[in-house]
Amino acid sequence: KQEVTQIPAALSVPEGENLVLNCSFTDSAIYNLQWFRQDPGKGLTSLLLIQSSQREQTSGRLNASLDKSSGRSTLYIAASQPGDSATYLCAVIALWGGKLIFGQGTELSVKP
Amino acid sequence: DVKVTQSSRYLVKRTGEKVFLECVQDMDHENMFWYRQDPGLGLRLIYFSYDVKMKEKGDIPEGYSVSREKKERFSLILESASTNQTSMYLCASSSVDRGYEQYFGPGTRLTVT
């Protein structure tokens, strides 16, 4: 059974720092991997989709990498800002049917 | 841009009431999903659908049913609401044409008293 783990569970950094969020999964047989952001009381916003054949994907200050063989993905946030404060979730997309298996999330706080 | 809308942001219902939560997507996605999210338990899949009139049970289907009569609309039904169904309910949609990237609605905060 696929399990997804995110470390750390919470992170507090000063504004301007570069940071890395980690995601690991137990079964490398995945379709794709997706990173989300969730603000308190809101729905999930898709940040990046990494296809299983890709090694990384970039959007603005965000860069996500994927290493299927080791079961790991990282989300790199450059020059963090207070507006980046949110919970970040990674999810692997199953081979069949597009079901997502979520990690528990990393709660990020960026202090001014 | 993909848009997923949910019928209510906040809903308060009494124990035993029948509750309908509706979700509509505008991108012709074939897949639609219902999740609930609770503190400490994360996101849990209730039901999903791969096509009109098709449904599959997720991880926690007990106490829920679904309906998909049109491709763009997926309804979650609580036949007899109970207090342990107080939660945030999230709808999502995806398509194999877009790598199964899931797009979420804003959520419905349901309180059952």
Image: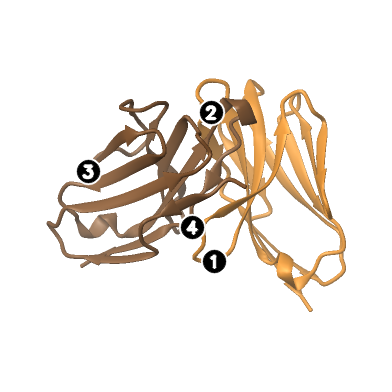
* Point 15% across, 51% down: residue: B80
Q: Chain of mark 1?
A: A
Dot 2 corresponds to which residue? A98
**Front tag of 1 and 4:** 4
Q: Quadrant of the C terminus of chain A?
A: bottom right
> Which residue is found at the position 82% from the left and 72% from the top?
A14
Determine the secondary structure under disc 3: loop
How far is disc 1 from disc 2 in space, using C-alphas?
26 Å
Disc 2/disc 4 C-alpha distance (Å): 20 Å
* Amino acid marked by disc 4: Pro
Label annotation for residue B106: 4
Q: Nearer the viewer, residue A46 or B111?
A: A46
Q: Earlier in the sequence, mark 1 or mark 2?
A: 1
- CA distance for labels 1 and 3: 26 Å
The kind of residue on which mark 1 rests is: Pro
Between disc 2 and disc 4, the foreground one is 4
Q: Position of residue A24 (x, y in %)?
A: 68, 37
Q: Are marks 4 and 3 on the same chain?
A: yes
Residue A79 occupies quadrant = bottom right
Q: Position of residue B8 (x, y in %)?
A: 36, 61
Residue named by callout 1: A40
- Per the image, label 2 sits on a secondary structure element best described as loop
- Under circle 4, the secondary element is loop
The chain letter of the brown chain reads B
Q: Are marks 1 and 3 in contact (CB under 8 Å)?
A: no
In this view of the protein, can residue A3 be seen by the observer? yes
